[in-house]
Image (cartoon, grey):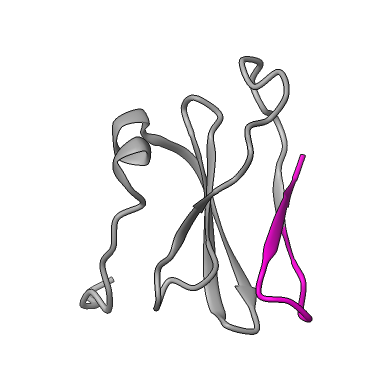
């Protein structure tokens, strides 16, 4: 509650402009990752919040419809994560 910032970063201009509507943290062998969904149903992935390298996830078919459920699946064997719907 009274903590200090450990690290700050930006998810990029597209995320800033379209606004985050959902976000999920996940653990993986490289640290703690972050996946975000914007109000336009675009998704962005960060594998490690300590060393932020933002990747966009390919567009979703029928992305103009609301996404009601999503999750992040992180493999312990690779440095990547997959977002499932």
User: Residue 18 appears at what percent x and percent y?
Assistant: 36, 29
Q: How many marks?
A: 0
Closer to the camera in the image, 1 or 5: 5
Closer to the camera in the image, 73 or 61: 61
* 81 inside magenta stretch: yes
* 60 inside magenta stretch: no
Quadrant of the rendered image containing residue 66: top right
User: Residue 12 appears at what percent x and percent y?
Assistant: 32, 47
- Residue at 21 percent across and 77 percent down: it is 4
Q: Is residue 32 above or below residue 71?
A: below
User: Residue 63 appears at what percent x and percent y?
Assistant: 64, 22
| Left or right of 61 in this view: 41 | left
Closer to the camera in the image, 5 or 17: 17
- Residue at 77 percent across and 39 percent down: it is 85
The range drawn in magenta is 73-85
Quadrant of the rendered image containing residue 6: bottom left
Quadrant of image for the N terminus: bottom left
User: Residue 28 appears at what percent x and percent y?
Assistant: 65, 77
| Left or right of 75 in this view: 8 | left
Q: Is residue 45 above or below residue 85?
A: below
- Residue at 73 percent across and 24 percent down: it is 61
Q: Is residue 12 above or below residue 76?
A: above
């Amino acid at each position: 509650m009274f903590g200090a910032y450990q690290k700050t970063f930006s998810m990029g201009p597209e995320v800033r402009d379209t606004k985050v509507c959902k976000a999920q943290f996940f653990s993986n062998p490289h640290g703690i990752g972050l996946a975000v969904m914007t109000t336009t149903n675009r998704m962005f992935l960060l594998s490690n919040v300590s060393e932020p390298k933002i990747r966009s996830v390919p567009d979703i078919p029928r992305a103009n419809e609301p996404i009601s459920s999503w999750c992040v699946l992180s493999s312990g064997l690779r440095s990547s994560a997959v977002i499932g719907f």
